Image (cartoon, grey):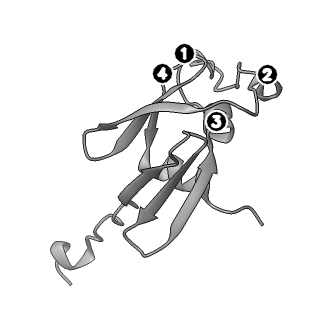
Amino acid sequence: MSFWDRIKPAPKPVTATDVQMAPDGSQLTLAWDDGTRTHATAQVLRQQCPCAACVDEWTNRRTLDPARVPTDLRIQALQPVGNYALTLTFSDGHGTGIYPWPLLRDITQPQG
């Protein structure tokens, strides 16, 4: 067996093929390249923000108190980040989090 026969390609990361924001900004729905559709509220997405203001960079401990994120929070804007992520701007003014596709898949996937 040659060296090339032993190399295993890395698994292809999950990728969103469509992103829809509810007209009132209350929810995000994503369609994925495997045919799955998932969704999450703006509140849940904000509670899971991965930015340095919400998660300590050294300890990886969440510094944002999820209980302080209001239930009526809205997504005001979303922007693609290359081909690998989204950045969301919320009605509380927060907009520094970069949400890579795998993180969005985890956040929006039904729990259970």
Task: Count neighbours of disc 2 (C-alpha within 10 A) and say few if under 14, some if 14 to 19, many if 20 or more.
Answer: few
Q: Which mark is residue 93?
A: 1
- Element carrying mark 3: loop
Pointers 2 and 3 in contact (C-beta within 8 Å): no
Which amino acid, by three-letter code, is at mark 4? Gly
**73 to 104, vertically: above or below:** above
Q: CA distance from mark 1 to mark 3?
A: 16 Å
Q: Quadrant of the N terminus?
A: bottom left
Which is nearer the N-term, disc 4 or disc 3? 3
In this rendering, is residue 12 above or below 24?
below
Q: Nearer the viewer, mark 2 or mark 1?
A: 1
Residue sitting at x 51%, y 67%: 37
Q: Which residue is mark 3?
A: 48
Q: CA distance from mark 1 to mark 4?
A: 6 Å
* Residue designated by label 2: 68
Secondary structure beneath dot 4 equals loop
Q: Nearer the viewer, residue 24 or 63?
A: 24
Marks 2 and 1, the one that precedes in the sequence: 2
What kind of element bears circle 1? Answer: loop
**Depth-wise, is mark 4 or mark 3 nearer the camera?**
4
Choose between 80 and 13: the one closer to the eye.
80
State the separation of the CA atoms marked 2 and 4: 16 Å
Q: Residue furthest bottom?
A: 1
Residue 86, how many percent across, how many down?
39, 39
Q: Residue at x 64, y 36 (%)?
A: 48
- From the image, state whether disc 1 or disc 4 is nearer to you: 1
Task: Determine which residue is flagged by label 4.
Answer: 95
- Which residue type carries mark 1? Gly
Q: Nearer the viewer, mark 1 or mark 3?
A: 1
Whether residues under marks 2 and 4 lie with C-beta atoms below 8 angstroms apart, the answer is: no
Q: Residue 77: give x, y in percent of width and height.
A: 42, 31
